[in-house]
Image (cartoon, grey):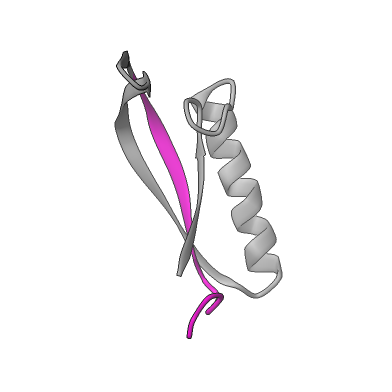
Amino acid sequence: MRNENFSVIWEGYTTDADAKKARDARWRELKAQGIHATRTILPNQLRKWASFGVWDGRTCNVYSINIYDNQGAG
């Protein structure tokens, strides 16, 4: 299993709605290819630090896709 994440803070989307829209579009692509994937959300994730010693403190939702395509399976 692997994950793809979509969020305002870490992936740079403008709004939560844009991140969710991108996640849903990617999920539809995977489903069309016959790849088993599930959508999840991690609400109100806190980014504690912007860089070493620099407090950030922002929160956002992280929209994720769990992809079950056996990539990387040994």
Q: Which residues are magenta?
A: 58-74
Up-down relation of residue 18 to residue 28 (above or below): above
Residue 50, position in %: x, y?
A: 39, 20
Up-down relation of residue 19 to residue 1 (above or below): above
Q: Residue at x 57, y 45 (%)?
A: 23
Is residue 15 covered in magenta? no
Using the image as rendered, state which of residue 12 and residue 30 is in the foreground. 12
Kindly indicate the quadrant of the structure image that contains residue 58: top left
Using the image as rendered, state which of residue 57 and residue 23 is in the foreground. 57
Prevailing SS of the magenta stretch: strand
Q: Looking at this view, name the residue that lies furthest to the bottom.
A: 74
Using the image as rendered, state which of residue 37 and residue 74 is in the foreground. 74
Q: Residue at x 54, y 22 (%)?
A: 15
Residue 46, position in %: x, y?
A: 29, 27
Quarter of the image that includes the N terminus: bottom left
Using the image as rendered, state which of residue 18 and residue 68 is in the foreground. 68
Residue 21 in the figure: left or right of residue 38:
right
Up-down relation of residue 48 to residue 19 (above or below): above
Q: Residue at x 38, y 44 (%)?
A: 41
Residue 51, position in %: x, y?
A: 40, 21
Residue 63 in the figure: left or right of residue 54:
right
Residue 63, position in %: x, y?
A: 45, 42
Kindly indicate the quadrant of the structure image that contains residue 49: top left
Callout count: 0
